[in-house]
Image (cartoon, grey):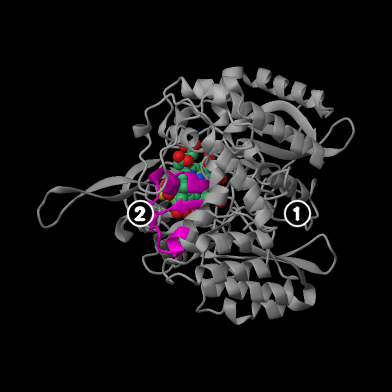
């Protein structure tokens, strides 16, 4: 079923069989793992009887496995131990076959398969919002896709109803397709692999999409081209070096998610300060060679939000060094990271346990053992640098060529819009489309003489959502998924964010982009702490006009003043809490903030001063 046909299936099926038939000593009662009718209850691995085959758990040292098993594992670790999630890469085909043949329904599958292990295939069950359907998250290294891939995404979601089958550009420069069912997944997976893409290892305890510079190779101010590096890291984590196929079991059992970002210029378009590993492009003071200062541990979550910390590591900007750095850090993270309390299982906690200096020393020593050179933290330029915009038309370093940034409101694309992007990409940008962490797209390499025609394309007409010329408020909106599809959301985000941006455009004028980010809950997938204005969903209260009683309604905590780019800093505390998500309350609040803090001028209806 995989890229090169059934032989691979047999390869993995053989391993799966071997795993299941191993004489395993269970440390936990089988009842802990709620198995339904399809899968049989599988006992946990024991440290004595680890399989000699490449599954996620088989790469864990004895000490790590014992630490997990002997320490009352949390439900996710239990599920991973009961049945290795890397099996999901082949199980998905069996599940789909059985459902198509009428031998099984998705409801009869093991709950842990549906809700946990399929995440290794990149399939996230939307149990609460659309039971039986999945969001499929891909990996798009450096956020670069082509027109044929865009059309494929559109074709995939076209199988599902229009309101469910949509495509989202994510805050990790990535693609998610919605409405996917188990029985249709194998065709999509095969189609992705045939197009050199994958959905494997894109969710839960895996290394997530590797983010790079959306201007890589186009930018006159570029220090390092991030494209080959992102591709190499993508292969490191999601391609089996033994088989050359998608899914690498070596990194198939981490203790938590893991984010990597590489910036190619001083703009830090990749947001290194909120990633577990951030590589900030800078020249080596001694040799003048371009490479990266390494920052570690940035993350956002309900429990804690942390800005990355500086290490005393500089690595060269070549594949070997960047690959080596990530390989070493991942190994320490996988083997030594927290496994019990998932709220403390992100890299920052491990770095702090070691101490930043000691952790840095360890990684440098590991790299040295592998013959890789590093240097200490390199000084950064201190002259003023203005972060550049990504939307609109801009000259490239190549004479006569332009990059054209297109606003995709809140990153949401219908199948029709995805096809329109593919068509204009074929016409003007050699079929290439780049995604940004602001959930927009860039069409690169547009010839000077073609720009006017591109801008006049019907897809950018006044009645359309996608725009090259956008306002400074609508152009800065980012939004997480929110309650339409996400079971953790406290508010609806995407539709509200898009609508409010248009209302604000009519009320306040700004000379610069104001970045308003929406996120439906404190997990902050919409990165509100990094926003100019961050709106985080929370419960609020208001008096019911009919009964006079206080009632719970959707609200937001408002964060103001996060920054991105060079020396980006997070805003950890909200300015205001529990503001109602109602037009008459939230819009005036936002106008006020834009005017007072971001130099906006009131205009239009309700406008006072200018
Ligand atoms: Fe996220 C969980 C969506 C970027 C922090 N995130 C989720 C889940 C999977 C929850 C769920 O099962 O419903 C959301 C899926 C909703 C859906 O249907 O789309 C979800 N996260 C997203 C996306 C799609 C938001 C978006 O609209 O763009 C982003 C997908 C990125 C990708 O392509 O891989 C997304 N999530 C982020 C980011 C931003 C980033 O990576 O720069 C963060 C903060 C940075 C970080 O991770 O440190 C983020 N998401 C979380 C967390 C908190 C992590 C933690 O350590 O606790 C969760 C909850 C969890 O993992 O337990 C979460
Ligand atoms: Fe869902 Fe919360 Fe992430 Fe939004 S921030 S996608 S609501 S988990």
Quarter of the picture holding the N terminus? bottom right
Mark 2: few, some, or many residues within 10 Å (few <14, many ≥20)?
few
Residue 344 on the magenta segment:
no
Image location of residue 394, percent across then percent down: 72, 64
Q: Is 59 rendered above or below residue 357? A: below
The residue lying at 35 percent from left, 54 percent from top is: 107
What's drawn in magenta, residue-wise?
98-126
Image location of residue 562, percent across then percent down: 53, 42
Image location of residue 520, percent across then percent down: 40, 49
**Could you say which disc has been placed on residue 107 in the image?**
2
Residues 377 and 593: in front is 377
Q: Nearer the viewer, mark 2 or mark 1?
A: 2
Q: Secondary structure at mark 1?
A: loop
**Does residue 121 appear in this view?**
no
Q: Is 101 rendered above or below residue 516? A: below
Mark 1: few, some, or many residues within 10 Å (few <14, many ≥20)?
many
Q: Quadrant of residue 257?
A: top right
Residue 117 on the magenta segment:
yes
Residues 609 and 267: in front is 267
> Relative to residue 558, is residue 201 drawn left or right?
right
Q: Is 594 rendered above or below residue 354? A: below
> Relative to residue 598, is residue 324 drawn left or right?
right
Q: Earlier in the sequence, mark 2 or mark 1?
A: 2
The residue lying at 64 percent from left, 81 percent from top is: 456
**Could you say which disc has been placed on residue 308 in the image?**
none
**Could you say which disc has been placed on residue 216 in the image?**
1
In space, the residues marked 2 and 1 are separated at their CA atoms by: 45 Å
Residues 222 and 592: in front is 222
For label 2, being within 8 Å of ligand 1 is answered no
């Amino acid at each position: 079923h995989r890229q090169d046909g059934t032989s691979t299936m047999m390869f993995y099926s053989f391993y799966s069989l071997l795993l299941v038939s191993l004489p395993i000593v269970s440390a936990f009662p089988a009842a802990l793992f709620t198995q339904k009718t399809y899968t049989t209850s599988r006992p946990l691995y024991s440290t004595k009887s680890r399989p000699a085959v490449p599954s996620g758990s088989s790469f864990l040292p004895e000490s790590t496995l014992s630490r997990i098993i002997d320490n009352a594992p949390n439900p996710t670790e239990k599920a991973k131990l009961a049945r290795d999630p890397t099996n999901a890469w082949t199980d998905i085909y069996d599940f789909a076959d059985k459902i198509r043949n009428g031998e099984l329904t998705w409801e009869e599958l093991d709950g842990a398969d549906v809700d946990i292990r399929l995440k290794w295939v990149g399939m996230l069950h939307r149990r609460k919002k659309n039971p039986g359907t999945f969001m499929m998250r891909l990996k798009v290294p450096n956020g670069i896709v082509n027109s044929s891939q865009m059309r494929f995404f559109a074709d995939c979601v076209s199988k599902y109803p229009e309101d469910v089958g949509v495509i989202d550009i994510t805050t990790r420069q990535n693609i998610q397709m919605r409405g996917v069912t188990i029985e249709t997944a194998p065709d999509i997976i095969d189609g992705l692999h045939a197009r050199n893409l994958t959905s494997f290892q894109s969710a839960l305890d895996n290394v997530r999409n590797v983010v790079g510079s959306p201007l890589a190779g186009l930018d006159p101010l570029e220090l390092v081209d991030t494209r080959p590096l992102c591709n190499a890291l993508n292969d490191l984590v999601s391609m089996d070096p033994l088989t050359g196929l998608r899914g690498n079991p070596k990194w198939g059992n981490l203790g938590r998610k893991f984010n990597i970002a590489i910036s190619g210029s001083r703009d830090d378009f990749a947001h290194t300060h909120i990633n577990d590993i951030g590589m900030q492009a800078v020249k080596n003071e001694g040799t003048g060679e371009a490479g990266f200062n390494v920052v570690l541990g940035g993350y956002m979550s309900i429990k804690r939000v942390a800005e990355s910390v500086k290490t005393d590591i500089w690595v060269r900007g070549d594949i070997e060094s960047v690959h080596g750095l990530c390989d070493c850090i991942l190994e320490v993270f996988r083997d030594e990271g927290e496994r019990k309390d998932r709220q403390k299982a992100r890299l920052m906690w491990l770095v702090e346990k070691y101490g930043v200096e000691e952790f840095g020393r360890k990684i440098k020593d590991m790299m040295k053992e592998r013959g890789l050179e590093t240097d200490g933290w390199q000084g950064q330029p201190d002259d003023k640098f203005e972060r550049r915009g990504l939307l609109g038309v801009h000259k490239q370093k190549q004479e006569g060529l332009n990059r054209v940034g297109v606003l995709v409101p809140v990153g949401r694309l219908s199948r029709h819009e995805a096809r329109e992007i593919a068509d204009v990409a074929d016409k003007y940008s050699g079929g290439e489309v780049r995604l940004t962490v602001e959930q927009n797209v860039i069409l690169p390499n547009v010839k000077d003489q073609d720009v006017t025609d591109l801008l006049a394309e019907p897809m950018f007409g006044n009645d359309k959502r996608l725009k090259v010329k956008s306002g400074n408020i609508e152009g800065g909106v980012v939004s997480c998924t929110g309650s339409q599809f996400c079971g953790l959301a406290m508010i609806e985000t995407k539709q509200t964010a898009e609508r409010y941006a248009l209302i604000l455009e009519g009320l306040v004028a700004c000379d610069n982009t104001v970045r308003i980010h929406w996120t439906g809950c404190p997990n902050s997938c919409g990165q509100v702490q990094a926003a100019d204005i961050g709106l985080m969903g929370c419960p609020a209260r208001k008096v019911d006009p009919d009964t006079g009683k206080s009632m719970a309604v959707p609200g937001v905590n408002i964060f103001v003043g996060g920054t991105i780019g060079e020396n980006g800093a997070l805003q950890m505390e909200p300015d205001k809490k529990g503001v109602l998500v109602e037009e008459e309350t939230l819009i005036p609040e936002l106008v006020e903030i834009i005017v007072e803090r971001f130099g906006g001028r009131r205009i239009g209806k309700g406008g006072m001063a200018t």
